[in-house]
Amino acid sequence: MEGLLLLVAILLPAVGSLLVVFLPWLNENRKDRNMFVGAILVLECIVVLMVAFDAERTLVLFEMTKQLPIALRSDGTSRVFSAVMSLMWAISGFYSFEYMKHEQNEKTYYAFYLMTLASLMALTLSGTMVTMYLFFEMMTFISVPMVLHNRTKEAVAAGIKYLIYSVAGATMGLLGIFMLTPNIASPYFVEGGSLLVDQLNVSHTAFQVIILVTIIGFGTKAGMFPMHGWLPTAHPVAPSPASAVLSGVITKAGVLAIFRMIFYVIGPDFIRGTWVQWTLLGCATLTVFMGSMLALREKTIKKRLAYSSVSQVSYVLCGVFILDTMALDGALLQLVFHALTKDALFLCAGVIIYKLGITRVDEMHNIGKVMPWTMWLFTICAISLVGIPPLGGFIAKWYIAEGALVSGTTVFSWLVPIILLISAMLTAGYLLPPSVSSFFGGMAHGEVDSALTQKMDPPLLMLIPIIILTTAILLLGIFPGTMIDVFTKLANTLF
């Protein structure tokens, strides 16, 4: 049956989640449960790769009406996003087998971990706006328990804030779907968009306002100003492997929704050169700068990394909103490298918390002497996030800046590269000093330092996932050619 793989990619983790809950033998033995969850994650990656190398498919699940089909679709965009999300989810999942030993409610964690993956795969494979909205909301509700996992007062407050922001953003997105549905040639996603510009049932100005509200709404999940407030509150309270995927993966759900709306529904030509484009670019560049400034001030490790994600994900949005092929290549490169880097950094932070109980940056003096592997990997990832060659962060930011310079987007053609450079310096300011301090720190925290008398790098089950991510950052940064070719081919179909 054509398109069956699309359904399997969604049902595999969903069924796995239910089995984790209802099979007694998986609840009685942690080792068996970990092996089962690991097998599901590996099989999911295999299925997603099979979808990526298969021909483009569309699978209609059912039709609410002729204009509202619920359908799945495999295309260039779904392949990129589903591959990145499933691989990052698997790597963080294997890390969690060791980390979660010290957490309660493991069964609940893995059940929602797999179900969230299922909703993300459904989101990436959505073939229509309504399907995308359905799974976008589903992903939000299912991922809330990962924020609430510790069930502390702080976690509950963060979960509520995450839910309120996400539902508000999705509602703003739903407004656009309401208005766009009668004004498009096809309910299915179409490369380049299918908006009937000459037959709009409202004025162009009103329609532009609706589009702006829609994109800002979906930008909530990506942490874009002015709907960014939930991210630095929700991510730090979750267990570290959950923080890694919340920051490195789930934020990309917002990017995906924006990507679909601009390039598969509205069409870039309707936005290019309008006040909508300038407003979106203004929001994205402001978020890049603001997130870096807030990260620089933050003293808690995970919260600093969360503010960093506010900034770094908006690099992707800058590349998208420039509406240029080269900038879009940079946006997709940044999407990949941010997922790799931020997952690795959060997992490193998890090791520090797991082994030493340290949660603040100013407590990291000399810890590199007892966990050298962890801190060297942290440092390499930090350098990549700054954008120093030959690591992957450099090539992504290079393409975004070059795309902005040749795009002719008035003031933003030079403002975007300047903001990226300023943000890179700020990133160096909030990530590199902790690394330096960890290897060459003074003795300000005597009681902590005196305890560091033996090597405390984590077990291999936690260390190997970080090594894999860091190696990928290095190799893909040195040899980005294949990725760039794939992304350029995708970008050329959208303009």
Image (cartoon, grey):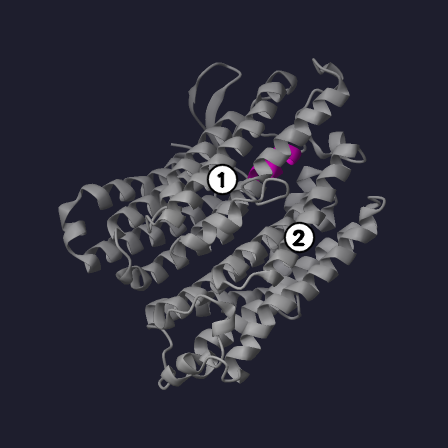
Asked whether, in this view, residue 310 is left or right of residue 115, the answer is right
| Residue drawn where x is 35% and y is 42% of the image | 115
Q: Nearer the viewer, residue 241 or 92?
A: 241
| Residue drawn where x is 48% and y is 21% of the image | 69
Q: Earlier in the sequence, mark 1 or mark 2?
A: 1
Q: Which residue is mark 1?
A: 124
Q: Residues within 10 Å of mark 1 (few under 14, many from 20)?
A: many
**Residue mark closest to the camera, 1 vs 2:** 2
Q: Residues within 10 Å of mark 2 (few under 14, many from 20)?
A: some
Asked whether, in this view, residue 177 is left or right of residue 284, the answer is left
Q: Nearer the viewer, residue 164 or 340?
A: 164
From the top left corner, tell me how far across and down residue 467 is, in percent.
45, 70
Where residue 4 sits, quadrant-wise, is top left
Q: Is residue 162 visible?
A: yes
From the top left corner, tell me how far across and down residue 60 is, in percent.
44, 25
Label 1: element kind? helix
Name the main secondary structure of what is drawn in magenta.
helix
Q: Quadrant of the N terminus?
A: top left
